[in-house]
């Protein structure tokens, strides 16, 4: 198969006009052929996938990039200037411009680099071959690492020796599986899997935030199951967080999503992978946000969802716990069942979606008004009253509940009738 040597600008709007092309032209006007597009935008264009982030590589020194753009009236932010990266703001859009680099030394978390003017040296320090393809304003491609074939074949291949690339930055283990989930076809490369398995303990040196960001991106792929299975086989998944479960539950959830047109939900997929008993430990390990932790714990505390529950059972759960926890647990469980059992859970999901939380008519002040003292006993009585109200289908009135107060306790009263 003859490989393409250029992208057709007519098929890619970002090569026709717009702020990215304007930025490229400004930098090249200061020094001819100094700057090209690189990385994901070129890779995705070759694979006919959406181009979201557009990055540029340049021979210009970061200070020169700032100077040129300032002169042209554009703002820059030194987001990673120690690594040669400047964020340029053009017409409200942000683009990373990174000076060509070569590695001097690495420790698995960060690299010591020097600026370079060589496209070959810059390409050699990148992670995967299809991320080292450059493209100029005409669409002409420069492919020093032979990444075009990988992009078209859906193959994720490290540049050079996989172990050497991973030792430069252990996050590349997770990036490997993320890219394999997003674009990989067939089986992963044996050398890559072997290297990831051998060096998996390096993941422990990474920050929790970097690990969680990559895991979420991986789980956002249309179908991450095959990649996650390889992560588990190589014990990379268990290294990211102890308490990961068999991947079958994730596969059932993805099948349910596809069959019911549910939107992709990376956090729900993550919950399908974890042991609920270890949810709190896992959440702390990965430093989930407060909102993410709240949702994960609601799922873990909800307990399993099984067929045969009646609406009252579910109403009690929805009232006493968190609705999102029940919905998440039901979505994860639904793929385990077939026929009538599956329809039971579908009915309960629909019920939960429409359920509105009723308001308990009795408050602490109502008991205090009739002589109860604030304290644990008052709380227990309120809880028991609420339990009877729930069991009645939320039907007992205020008067009916007040009539029951004397039967539920009263040792804490200072007066009044019990």
Image: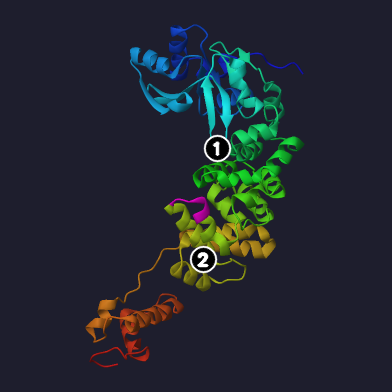
Q: Are marks 2 and 1 in contact (CB under 8 Å)?
A: no
Height in image: 224 above or below 277? above
Residue at position x 65%, y 57% from top? 245
Q: Nearer the viewer, residue 168 or 224?
A: 168
Residue 137 appears in the rendering: yes
Give the quadrant of residue 118: top right
Task: Residue 333: give x, y in percent of width and height.
Answer: 62, 60
Q: Nearer the viewer, residue 122 or 146?
A: 122
Q: Residues within 10 Å of mark 2 (few under 14, many from 20)?
A: some
Indicate the position of residue 133 as horizontal and vertical percent values: 62, 20
Q: Is residue 60 left or right of residue 386?
A: right
Q: Is residue 193 left or right of residue 215?
A: right
Let me know if residue 347 appears in the view: no
Q: Quadrant of the N terminus?
A: top right
Residue 352 horizontal/vertical position (percent): 49, 62
Which region shows up in magenta?
A: 284-289
Per the model, the C-alpha gap separating discs 2 and 1 is 36 Å
Mark 2 lies on residue: 301
How many neighbours does mark 1 have within 10 angstroms: few (below 14), some (14-19), or many (20 or more)? some
- Report the front residue among 241 and 92: 241
Write down the residue under mark 1.
109
Q: Please say if 393 is above or below 219.
A: below
SS under mark 1: loop
Tag on residue 291? Answer: none
277 falls in the magenta region: no
Q: Position of residue 233 (x, y in %)?
A: 72, 49
């Amino acid at each position: 198969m003859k490989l393409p040597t250029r992208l057709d600008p007519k098929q890619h709007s970002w090569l026709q006009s717009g702020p990215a092309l304007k930025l490229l032209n400004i930098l090249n006007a200061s020094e001819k052929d100094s700057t090209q597009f690189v990385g994901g935008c070129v890779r995705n264009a070759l694979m006919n996938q959406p181009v979201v982030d557009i990055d540029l590589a340049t021979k210009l020194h970061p200070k020169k990039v700032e100077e040129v753009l300032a002169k042209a009236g554009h703002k820059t932010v030194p987001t990673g200037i120690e690594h040669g990266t400047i964020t340029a703001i053009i017409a409200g859009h942000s683009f990373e411009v990174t000076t060509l680099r070569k590695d001097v030394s690495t420790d698995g978390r960060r690299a010591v680099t020097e600026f370079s003017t060589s496209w070959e040296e810059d390409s050699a320090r990148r992670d995967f071959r299809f991320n080292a393809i450059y493209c100029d304003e005409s669409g002409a491609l420069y492919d020093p690492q032979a990444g075009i074939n990988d992009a078209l074949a859906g193959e994720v291949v490290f540049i050079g020796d996989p172990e050497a690339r991973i030792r430069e930055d252990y996050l590349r283990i997770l990036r490997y599986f993320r890219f394999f989930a997003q674009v990989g076809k067939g089986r992963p490369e044996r050398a890559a899997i072997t290297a990831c398995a051998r060096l998996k303990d390096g993941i422990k040196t990474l920050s929790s935030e970097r690990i969680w960001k990559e895991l979420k991106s991986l789980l956002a792929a249309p179908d991450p199951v095959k990649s996650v299975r390889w992560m588990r086989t190589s014990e990379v998944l268990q290294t990211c967080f102890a308490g990961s479960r068999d991947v079958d539950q994730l596969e059932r959830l993805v099948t349910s999503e596809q069959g019911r047109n549910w939107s992709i939900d990376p956090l729900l997929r993550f919950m399908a992978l974890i042991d609920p008993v270890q949810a709190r430990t896992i959440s702390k390990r990965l430093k989930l946000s407060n909102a993410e932790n709240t949702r994960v714990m609601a799922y873990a505390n909800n307990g399993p969802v099984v067929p045969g529950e009646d609406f009252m059972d579910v109403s009690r759960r929805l009232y006493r716990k968190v609705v999102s926890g029940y919905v998440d647990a039901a979505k994860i469980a639904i793929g385990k069942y077939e026929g009538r059992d599956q329809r039971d859970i579908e009915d309960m999901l629909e019920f939960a979606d429409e359920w509105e939380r009723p308001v308990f008519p009795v408050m602490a002040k109502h008991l205090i008004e009739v002589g109860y003292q604030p304290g644990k006993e008052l709380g227990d009585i309120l809880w028991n009253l609420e339990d009877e109200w729930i069991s009645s289908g939320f039907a007992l009135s205020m008067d009916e509940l007040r009539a029951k107060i004397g039967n539920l306790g009263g040792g804490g009263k200072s007066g009044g009738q019990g």
